[in-house]
Image (cartoon, coloured by chain):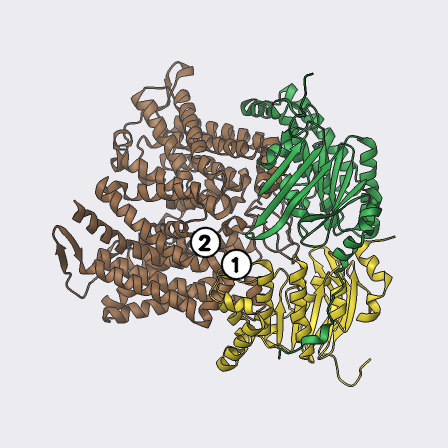
Amino acid sequence: MNTAKPALLSIDAIDVHYGAVQALYGVSLHVNAGEVVSVLGGNASGKSTTLKSVLGLVGPTQGRIVLDGREIQGRAPADVIDLGVASVPEGRRVFPDMSVDENLLLGAYPRRKHKADIAQDLAEVFTTFPRLAERRKQLAGTLSGGEQQMLALGRAWLRRGKLVCIDEPSMGLSPRFVDAVYDVLFRWKAAGQTILLVEQNARIALELADRAYVLQYGHVVLEGNAADLAADAAVQKAYLGAA
Amino acid sequence: MLELFASQIVNGLAIGQVYALIALGFSLVFGVSNLINFAQGALFMLGAFIAFTGVTTLHLPLVAAAALSVAVMSLLGMLLERLALRPLENAPYIAPVLSTLAISLIVDQLAEIIWSPEGQAFPVPFEEVTYFFGSAYITSTDLLIFGFGAAAAIALTLFLSRSWLGRTLRATAQDRDAAAQLGVRTSNVKRLAFGLAGALGALSGILVALYFKSVFPQMGLPYGLKGFAAALLGGLASTPGAVLGGLLLGIVETLASAYIGEGYRDLVAYTLVLVFLVFRPQGLLGDRRLDALGGLGGAGGAMPSTSVLSSSSSQRKATRVLELPPWGFLAVGLALALLPVATQNAYVLQAVAYAIIFALLVASVTLVSGSLGILSIGHMAFYGVGAYAVGILARNHGWPAEAALLGAAAITAIIAMVAALPLLKLSGHTAALGTLAVGQIGYLVFMTWLDVTRGPMGFIGIPAPRLGLLGGYTLASLTQKFCLIAVVVAVGLALAQRLLNSGIGRVWRGIREDRLAAHAAGLPVRRYILLGFALSGLLAGTAGGLFAYVQSVVSPESFTVSASILLLTLAVLGGLGNLTGAALAGFALTLLPELLRPFAEWRMIAYGVALLLMLRLRPNGLLGAR
Amino acid sequence: MVHSLPTPGSTQPGLHVQGLSRHFSGVKAVDDVSFDLLPGEILALVGPNGAGKSTLIQLVSGVERPTAGRILLGDVRLDGRGPERIARLGMGRSFQTSRVFPALTVWDSVRLGTQAGLLRGGGTMHKDPGSGHGRLSNPLAEIAGELLGLPGWRRRRAEADARAETALKRFGDRLWPRRDQPAFSLSYANRRRLEIARVLAAEPRYVLLDEPAAGMNPSETAELTDLLLALRAEQPTLGLLVVEHKLSLVRRIADRVVVLNQGRVLATGTPAEALDDPEVVEAYLGRRRTRPAESDAHLG
């Protein structure tokens, strides 16, 4: 355990309820600066809910979430984003009737005062994603699923956040695009970006991540080094329900 | 010929530009909050009057008065959002819509108190010049309106596409959650949209004041409705659509007025709306988001429901429902029929008779709006059909009362079913808009079909009800008519309550709660919707027939859309889908104004405030929504 | 010799999905999918998120229209028909987010499931499905029956209510004692049960269940598994299509499994064959990357 520095993000025993239904039971996890942490699990395991409570999209009924020394549980999403968080939402959620350019620009909304930096980052995104550069003026709704995911990644990159939260980036994408998405994430990791990643695609997520947590029925059932978990039969069980 | 046509087009573009500005107010608000803001008309009227006061009382130059008005109205728009809508975020979906209706009732009446109900001349500080091109002409006012309107629309478009605020507004409209995840404070964006709606309201109000060189407190509703129609034609959430819809509506109705007749201006406009609802409900440039009202459970695991009574919060509270059994209506009706034993005071009997008729009418509204979940903003049209039908059958054809009432009820039921045909595939806001168009068309037909209705002159000389089964016994006195009314209404309500308690009522409520699930359960949804409209028409037609017998004169003023709006609020007040609540609200709120006659001008304000309070405190109505 | 050609689209009983596709603005949610569901069979449809399972249910039940392909129930074409008609042909379905008519009582909610059968003359969904595609009784007769409480109508209603009661009581004490509560007051798991009860109350010939065990804990899932097995023992001709993520349930009840991935059929077979297929394991867990990761770190 590293004791020298407190974690960038720590979730401390949170419960989340949707009406009468409890989705999370005392979930705890932490992400250190510069680390890639993945939350894995099958459908309805609570992995997305965990991410949503960090982003302020759902409010925990119990427990604390601390970002950079500040408690953020129950804060509005905009407040959390203002503290230096970027989000790649589940299902991409690009603005369909806005151009690729405008979508990217909106990613930089919290630092809209820094025009020159934004222009530079925008150029950088276009070199990383040549496909987006070709489609700058096109409406985002007309892009393919994979291109939209690239756009969502680029949009989050423009936030220049100290923590990027990514929700199921491989969902509904063909293997070629899954590879392309993860290529980008590997580069971000190499550049030192801290990432909290929620993913159903366990193998690839465990390859990217430093550490991972496995959720089942709203409980953390496994946690540890990504490499160890990748070899664990229990991970397979969590997905395939083998007896 | 061609020149006349050209000048009509120019004329249409000018008035269309005004509609476009009002429509932009609707679509900005709808985009970010999925709400149809019925107070937009009130903002428009108030904007015109503030400029009027600026010019006449404060002696400001027109430009300064206009700027003042725009500024004040922007603030009022934001205030509207804060006071009337923010507190209702977790309330049933219908609550904020009704809240804006209540606000517009209050504002319209306040304007009558402050500026007098009469129209007043709006001083135009410049000479009007008319330019001729052959026999075509165009006035400087037309040019001014078109120029200003177009400039405002362009400025708004630039603001939306170029500024950070504008971008966040569009992003919020397209995907609120995604915008929030980029750090956009969506509640501030919502306030901004209301502020802009206020500013657009003011601007369009001033332009209309210049166009007609006058202002009047009742101008809000008709222009508000036109703007709403324009927004819908364009596609509610689309800003270019709003402009396009406004221009289209302006041109079409100007041409209709020029080539068919002035009386047909609005008739053609609302028929166009109805046609669009049937063939292109998403409007010219819109998407299908309108269907989403309550239909899609959000990520929060909310319960799927298409009901206007459900809310976005996943918790629903059980409410107690107070209802009479079917025989209870008969008992109450019988007791009321004995009222003439206690008093022979004609004033009292007349007032109570109207109250009983309204009880039946509001019950007919709650059947469609509450049980079936299709908000009806046009029920006065059905009431009117019943009234005219009795008039025609009893006077022109000499039918006895039983036959005339039954005939009127049947005719109204059929017309209600026909009116429901274009609404079958609609739900939520679009269905409400469809009923609004039906209500307007009904009223306009009463106004223009002179051969049958005699239009604004009124249909006179309806004979006293003659009972064929009792050997032609005629109910000549008010007392006798009173008894007839009490008995007929009681029987009607008892039968309706019995149906509501039966399997048919259950299916209606099922269709309201979740139309998709109703389809998937194999329920013949169209059949039950038509059945609901037929029964509602039956009750409304009967009420209208009784009304015709009491009044012996029928004229279109009784059947306006603003009266229809009032009916809907009464149904909500009683508890949607609750027949007892509806009857009670209809009865009490028809009598109450009689008691408050000395304070007549404050009465709508009191009513509006009561409605607002009730939406806050008892969103399910006095006796509970069923 | 007279050659008797096989009739096109064969009259073999069962639900036949043939080459079905559904595209949403460039995304192939369902892509050329074929399978059969025979009477008496339990077929499970599994696959990772976004594989197209729910879209498939939407297509078969008529809520969405296919872009291409055919759906047959026996020899009746289902594609192109609306959800009402398909339901009245004997195909019941549940939704992924349980749709239970929230403001109605539990009892009223389940009774709505019997209404269509009642309109068809008191019969249930599975009797003579083909004849006239189910004529409904005249609305005037319905009003008269309800208003006047005519004996014939009351008998039909009593029969329908008996079916509704049986369906509710299938879930033991979970629903029956709560029958007068509004449906929205039920727990998530009970809402799932209520929806299944409503589907069963119609006595359909085929049932499509979209994630029936979602939101249920392991013991509740086991309870549902037993219920489905009991149902099949009682009604040996009932065809059941279950979309489910809980593979423990799938392994216990399914005769056959169809695995979908990215809109296409990846594997078919018995649960053991299909779920242990390496390709399927890969679809769930993701595949191993072929390239070393740290090769091209240059952004930032």
Q: Residue furthest front?
A: C1
Reply above or below: B415 against B614. above
Determine whether, in the image, residue C144 is placed left or right of residue B227.
right
Classify residue B567 by image quadrant: top left
Q: Which residue is mark 1?
A: A141
Residue B36 tag number: 2
Classify residue B392 by image quadrant: top left
Of the two numbered discs 2 and 1 in the rendering, the one whose residue sits closer to the viewer? 1
Residue C64 location in percent, x, y? 59, 43
Q: Under tag 1, what secondary structure?
A: helix
Give the chain letter for green: C
| Residue under the image location 34 percent in, 23 percent down | B393
- Callouts 2 and 1 on one subunit: no
Q: Colour of chain A?
A: yellow
Residue C10 location in percent, x, y? 68, 28
Residue B619 location in percent, x, y? 55, 51
Reply above or below: A3 against B185. below
Residue C20 in sight here: yes
Q: Chain ID for label 1?
A: A
Determine whether, in the image, residue B565 is placed left or right of residue C106.
left
| Residue under the image location 84 percent in, 47 percent down | C272
Give the residue type that dot 2 points to: Ile
The quadrant of the rendering that contains the N terminus of chain A is bottom right
| Residue under the image location 64 percent in, 78 percent down | C298
Q: Under tag 2, what secondary structure?
A: loop
Q: Colour of chain B?
A: brown
**Mark 2 and mark 1: Cα distance apart in space:** 26 Å
Question: What number of labels is visible?
Answer: 2
Q: Are marks 2 and 1 in contact (CB under 8 Å)?
A: no
